[in-house]
Amino acid sequence: MIQRFIELGEGYSDLYELLEIAKANQERITHMLQFETIKNEKKVCSLVVILKPTTTGDFQPLYICREGIPVLENKKSKRVILF
């Protein structure tokens, strides 16, 4: 199986695109992940949608919005709630 990260950007429009990819491929979704890290002394997260491999080619896409969403200690980001 071939797995590839397909990187979207870090803004709201990119998150909306990630959500549309998930919505259009509901039957193929295997996982929706949130990775957290520290970047420039601030906690941020990346959101990932992993789809089932394609029948032809056995290709598994991992769509990611990378390190652009702040993780707040006392409340959830609206972008994370949408996800």
Image: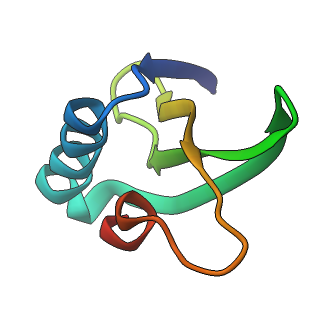
Relative placement, left or right, of 42 versus 69 is right
- Residue at (35, 66) in percent of width and height: 78
Task: Determine which quarter of the picture holds residue 10.
Answer: top left
* 24 w.r.t. 13: above or below: below
16 lies above or below 67: below
| Quarter occupied by the C terminus | bottom left
Displayed quadrant of residue 75: bottom right
Quadrant, the N terminus: top right
Quick one: 32 or 72, which is closer to the camera?
72
In the displayed structure image, the side of residue 42 where residue 66 appears, left or right: left
Q: In the image, is residue 74 above or below residue 77?
A: below
Image position of 50 (left or right of 56): right
Residue drawn at (45%, 48%), measured in percent from left and top? 49
Picture coordinates of residue 55, whole percent (x, y): 35, 35
Q: Between 33 and 38, which is closer to the camera in this rendering?
A: 38
- Image height check: is 34 above or below 51? below
Residue 82 locus on image (x, y percent):
30, 67
By what rule are the colours in the image chosen?
Answer: rainbow
Where residue 41 sits in the image (x, y, percent)?
A: 87, 35
Q: Which residue is situated farthest in the bottom direction here?
A: 74
**Residue 30 appears at what percent x and percent y?**
49, 61
